Image (cartoon, helix red, strand yellow):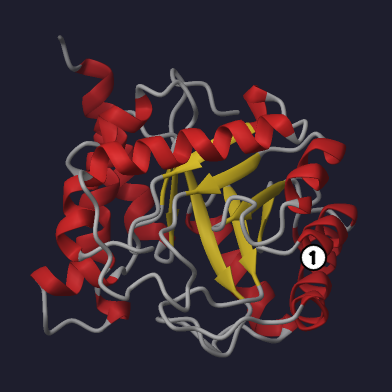
Amino acid sequence: MFNALNKPLIMGILNVTPDSFSDGGYFNNITSALMHVEKMLNDGADIIDIGGESTRPYSISVSSGEQVQRVIPIIKAIRQQLSTNVPISIDTRISTVAKMALAEGATIINDVSAGQNDPNILTVAADFDCPIILMHIKGTPQTMQNNPIYNNVLADVLTGLQRNVEHAKAAGVKQEKIILDPGIGFGKTSEHDLTLLGHLDQFVKSGYPILLGASRKKFLKSIIPTAPPQDLAIATSVTTALAVMAGVNIIRVHDVKENRQALDVAWAIKQLRTN
């Protein structure tokens, strides 16, 4: 699924939350959520990523019970009404939420804390033998944007991701089930984010599948200051094309159609590029 020689995958975002930074409250009932998932699949999404907690800067943590109430009915509905085989990623930092989501049909865990919030989530991934996305974050969503400082952002993020890998393996997660995410916007300034985007090939060289989540992120507004998040699909698609050329395997986006086109064009060029 994540072979470096294979075409990268588009992960479509479904935030079942009232407070996500660009689409909070849009899809927090089954009808609207299913309509959006169907649209994303028709537009070319390969994976659906479902989250019941916003992890935007300074967001408030959501209990496991509330997350379960938000995400489990949606996962069940997707499996029953739309698709029995599309990969579903559960975006959560809580092991009990991940376990219940996997039991109902999710197939991937996406933990922005990489097990730091709840180490048992690594054990859940090992027990279900499912892929787990380990993201780099400096601090927590509540603290991460309080003046983040690095000695060398690229080296420090790579080191942090390797530490995440070691923790996951120690919990029993197989190496081939680990996916890494540099964590654009999670404890980084806009300059940090742009530096990481300019060196995506260094993450690819780690040997692990790499996920990029730059969609509608705040660093884009530092370049295009007048655009609301919903108008950043074109800007996001530029990062998608860069990611494809760098060898990134999964690209997590809000606007599937635009980023599918960017991915397809970049991939076609990449296939004919000579070294």
From this viewpoint, is residue 198 visible? yes
| 240 sits left or right of 83 in the view | left
In percent of width and height, residue 167 lies at: 64, 37
Q: Closer to the camera, 139 or 261?
A: 139
Find residue 116 and report its image quarter: bottom right
Q: Is 201 situated left or right of 133 in this image?
A: left
- Quadrant where the N terminus is found in the figure: top right
Label 1: which secondary element:
helix
Q: Tally the numbered discs.
A: 1
| Place of residue 209 in the rendered image (x, y in percent of width and height, measured from the top left) | 49, 30
Q: Tell me the residue at 28%/66% (across/down).
A: 233
Q: Quadrant of residue 132?
A: top right
Report the residue at 55% width, 28% height from top: 2
Q: Quadrant of residue 211?
A: top left
Whether residue 265 appears in this view of the structure is no
Q: In the depicted view, which residue is nearer to us: 111 or 103?
A: 111
Identify the residue at horizontal 25%, vertical 36% (top origin). 266
Mark 1 nearby-residue class (10 Å; few <14, some 14–19, many ≥20): many
**Extreme residue in the front direction:** 151
Q: Residue at x 33, y 28 (%)?
A: 247
**Residue 244 or residue 267, whichever sits in front:** 244
What amino acid is found at the position of numbered circle 1 in the picture? Val
The residue identified by callout 1 is 97
x, y percent for residue 29: 71, 86
Q: Does residue 100 appear left or right of residue 138 in this picture?
A: right
Residue extending furthest toward the top: 275
Figure quadrant of the C terminus? top left
Q: Find residue 71 and report its horizontal and vertical position in percent.
A: 75, 73
Front-most of residues 259 and 187: 187
Q: Is residue 129 above or below residue 3?
A: below
